[in-house]
Every structure is written in structure tokens, then in C-alpha cells.
Image: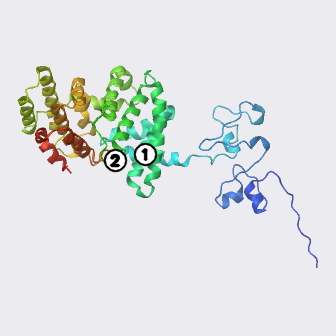
């Protein structure tokens, strides 16, 4: 008995995967059944008008220059009963998976490490990414911080994540710098949160031995200038920030500052530092600045030092640095022993936060920097901070 060979109609519009395998393509959209079954990306060609491909990392959008090539698309991006055009064209898989991984890590992990306050954790997890959807420099900042977080814990891919972090942050910095001179009601929240992200990024970035963290040849460190810059943003637009998407963060910070009137800690260490400074007989103006810094630092010690971590917010540690007078920072940039010694005592408070990955080891690096900027006599002034931080000179 002779058997006749069953013929089938060849198609020129199937996907390339089916053509290479020499099997009939069902031409289902956006992915044919064969490709779906084998879990491979379908490059279904379809009609000639759908052959335009999307660039890597971007979703395909309709060709507005040739409206006849695609169906009319209403506000929701799809015709009645049809898929959005970028899905019809078969480019739904053209996603930047690294960005998705970094954003997922930020919302499920990194955001929970940026505050002890449950309300502020939610703000970092929800509100901040929402701002990033409107301001790409914020989104790039979010991704850079998430990449640093992964690099800290994923040693097997550390180099990859560090390169991602650097690239994302540089992209964000270029965009943010262009609008920083023009703070408005619309962009003030975005600029503030990016400045905050950049501070954490600077603290979390890997350091080489010998890197300065407080004083450089050009003056005080860039991260300290940036931290103080956040105060400038607040001073320019306080009402807009308090009523914007970051409102809970600012109201919490205001409570920390106004409630920072704890009784002065009975510890004698700061009193001893004041005695050391008075013995050097600085001029009256400088002594007033040093006294005020020590007085405010004593309040921070009462609020934070020796207390259970659940009883204070991370922001309480930085209240002193936020409030300190600009004249003190000028003295610090001049490397006066008195200003350096006061900052060494502040390092003891930073140590209280070092259960967080993004600030781990910062107190030791700062103390090291200060120690080697002081002469032998003034190094005796900071023995107690060195012991509390646990740093030992080489």
C-alpha cells in the first residue's frame, strides 16, 4: 500500500525559531506556542509593520509618525479587546532585567535597612520609588544604592554589582546636577531624596586603605558637604517638603530635633574635652563655637549613647551634624585640633549605627583620619573615642 505524504502550507510570517527548527509556527501573539513550550524568547515577525525592534532595556512604543501602521490606541494603551502595541509587536520581553532585579531588591530589602522607624521604612519602600517614576535621576539613585547593597552581601558577583552601582550613580548625578540650581515645588522632594541617597551611597562605597573620609587636601570631605547641602534644600522649601510625599520623614526629623532636649549626659568625657580645649586658650569667638558644639553633642549623647537601638531613630545620630554651625565646619576644614577632637567624639555616636551595612566601619575610618591629622599631644585628647570605637593605630 502506498502512502501519500501529507503536505502543509509553508508560511513566511512565522517566528525565526520555528523556521530554524523547520517546524510549523502557530503564529500566536505575542509568543507562539512552540516557543512558549520550550521557554525561549519568541521573535515572531508578523506583518512588516511590526518588524521594528526595541532598543535594549526599553519597551517598544507605537510609531507615531506612521499612524496607519498600528491600530488607534486609546488612553490606556490598547484598542478594544486587543493587546497594547508593544506587546502585539512581540517586544514584551525586551526588559532590562538588571534594573528589575535592583528595583526588586530595593523594595524588598534595601529600603528596610534605611530606618528603624516602620513608618519611614514604608516611605522608603513606597513613596521614594514613586518619586523615581517621575524623576529618573531618583530612580538611578535607587538602583545605585540597591547595587551597593547586593555587592555587600553577594561576594560571588561583587565586581558586577559595584560596576552597576557606579554607573547608575554617575548617570543620576549628571541629571540631578543640571536641575539643582532651580529648586521648585515640583522637584524639591526629588532633589532632597536624591541628596539623602547620595549620602548613604558615599558612606557605603568601598574604600581603599588611606582614603580620607573627613578631611582631604581640598577641605572637608564631599559627603559632609553634601549632607549639609540637604539642609540648604530644606531651608529653601520647608513648607513644600513637609506637605509633599516625604512629609512623614520631615515631621519625624522635626520631632527628633525639637525633642532633642534631653538632660545633659552625666558622663565626664565631654567635660574633660572642654577642659582640654579651654587649656589651649583659643580666641573667644572660637571658644564660643567649640562650647556650643560640645553642648549640642552632649544632648545627642543623652539621646543615643548607651541606649537600646530600638529606642532611637537613625536620624537622632545625625541631628548634631545637621545642626552644627557653619563656623565649626570652617574650623574643621582648617584642621584645628579642637574641631578634629570634637568630631572624634561624634564618631562614638556613629558607632551606635554600625549594625547597618551602609555605615559599617565608618567610625573607625573617621577616627583613623583624625588621629593621623593630630600631633602626639592632641592624640591624647581622643583616647576615649578610640577606645569606644575599638580602633587601634597601626
Percent x, y for residue 149? 39, 48
Percent x, y for residue 136? 50, 34
Q: Is residue 230 left or right of residue 329?
A: right
Q: Do callouts 2 and 1 mark residues in contact (Cβ within 8 Å)?
A: no
Can you tell which of label 2 and label 1 is closer to the viewer?
Answer: 2
For residue 32, which quarter of the picture?
bottom right
**Which residue appears at 6% of the width and 38% of the height?**
268
Which is more N-terminal, label 1 or label 2?
A: 1
How many other residues sit within 10 Å of disc 2, few (<14), some (14-19) or many (≥20)? Answer: few
Percent x, y for residue 281? 7, 26
Secondary element at image label 1: helix
Residue found farthest to the right: 1
For residue 239, which quarter of the picture?
top left
**Which residue appears at 14% of the width and 48% of the height?**
387
Which quarter of the rendered picture does the N terminus lie within? bottom right
Q: Is residue 145 left or right of residue 90?
A: left
Q: CA distance from mark 2 to mark 1?
A: 21 Å
Picture disc at residue 125: none
What residue would you read off at disc 1? 146
Residue 139 makes an appearance in the image: no
Secondary element at image label 2: loop
How many other residues sit within 10 Å of disc 1, few (<14), some (14-19) or many (≥20)? Answer: many
- Answer above or below: position of 153 versus 182: below
Foreground residue among 4 and 292: 292
- Answer above or below: position of 204 versus 41: above
Residue 345 makes an appearance in the image: yes
- Answer above or below: position of 383 versus 234: below
Q: Is residue 76 left or right of residue 250?
A: right
What residue would you read off at disc 2? 208
**Which residue appears at 44% of the width and 48% of the height?**
162
For residue 80, which quarter of the picture?
top right
Amino acid at each position: 500500500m502506498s502512502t501519500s505524504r501529507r503536505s502543509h502550507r509553508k508560511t513566511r510570517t512565522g517566528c525565526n525559531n520555528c523556521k530554524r527548527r523547520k517546524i510549523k509556527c502557530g503564529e500566536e501573539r505575542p509568543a507562539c506556542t512552540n516557543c512558549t513550550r520550550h521557554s525561549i524568547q519568541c521573535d515572531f515577525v508578523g506583518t512588516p509593520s511590526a518588524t521594528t525592534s526595541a532598543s535594549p532595556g526599553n519597551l517598544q512604543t507605537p510609531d507615531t509618525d506612521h499612524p496607519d501602521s498600528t491600530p488607534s490606541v486609546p488612553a490606556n494603551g490598547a484598542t478594544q479587546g486587543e493587546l497594547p502595541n508593544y506587546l502585539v509587536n512581540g517586544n514584551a520581553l525586551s526588559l532590562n532585567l538588571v534594573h528589575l532585579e535592583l528595583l526588586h531588591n530595593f523594595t524588598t530589602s534595601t529600603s528596610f535597612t534605611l530606618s528603624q522607624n516602620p513608618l519611614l521604612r514604608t516611605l522608603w519602600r513606597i513613596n521614594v520609588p514613586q518619586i523615581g517614576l517621575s524623576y529618573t535621576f531618583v530612580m538611578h539613585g535607587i538602583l545605585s544604592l540597591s547595587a551597593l547593597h547586593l555587592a555587600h552581601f553577594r561576594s560571588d558577583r561583587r565586581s558586577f554589582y559595584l560596576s552597576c552601582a557606579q554607573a547608575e550613580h554617575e548617570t543620576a548625578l549628571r541629571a540631578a546636577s543640571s536641575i539643582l540650581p532651580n529648586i521648585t515645588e515640583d522637584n524639591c522632594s526629588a532633589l532632597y531624596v536624591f541628596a539623602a541617597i547620595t549620602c548613604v551611597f558615599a558612606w557605603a562605597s568601598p574604600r581603599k586603605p588611606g582614603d580620607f573620609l573627613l578631611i582631604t587636601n581640598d577641605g572637608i570631605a564631599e559627603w559632609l558637604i553634601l549632607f549639609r547641602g540637604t539642609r540648604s534644600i530644606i531651608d529653601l522649601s520647608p513648607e513644600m517638603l513637609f506637605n509633599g510625599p516625604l512629609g512623614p520623614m520631615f515631621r519625624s526629623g522635626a520631632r527628633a530635633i525639637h525633642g532633642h532636649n534631653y538632660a545633659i549626659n552625666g558622663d565626664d568625657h565631654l567635660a574633660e574635652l572642654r577642659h582640654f580645649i579651654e587649656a589651649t586658650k583659643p580666641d573667644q569667638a572660637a571658644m564660643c563655637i567649640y562650647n556650643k558644639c560640645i553642648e549640642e553633642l552632649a544632648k545627642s549623647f543623652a539621646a543615643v549613647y548607651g541606649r537600646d537601638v530600638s529606642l532611637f531613630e537613625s536620624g537622632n545620630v545625625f541631628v548634631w551634624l545637621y545642626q552644627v554651625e557653619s563656623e565649626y565646619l570652617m574650623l574643621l576644614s582648617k584642621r584645628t585640633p579642637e574641631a578634629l577632637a570634637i568630631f572624634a567624639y561624634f564618631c562614638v555616636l556613629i558607632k551606635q549605627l554600625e549594625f547597618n551595612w551602609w555605615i559599617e566601619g565608618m567610625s573607625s575610618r573617621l577616627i583613623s583620619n583624625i588621629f593621623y591629622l593630630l600631633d602626639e599631644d592632641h592624640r591624647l585628647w581622643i583616647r576615649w573615642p578610640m577606645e569606644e570605637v575599638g580602633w587601634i593605630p597601626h
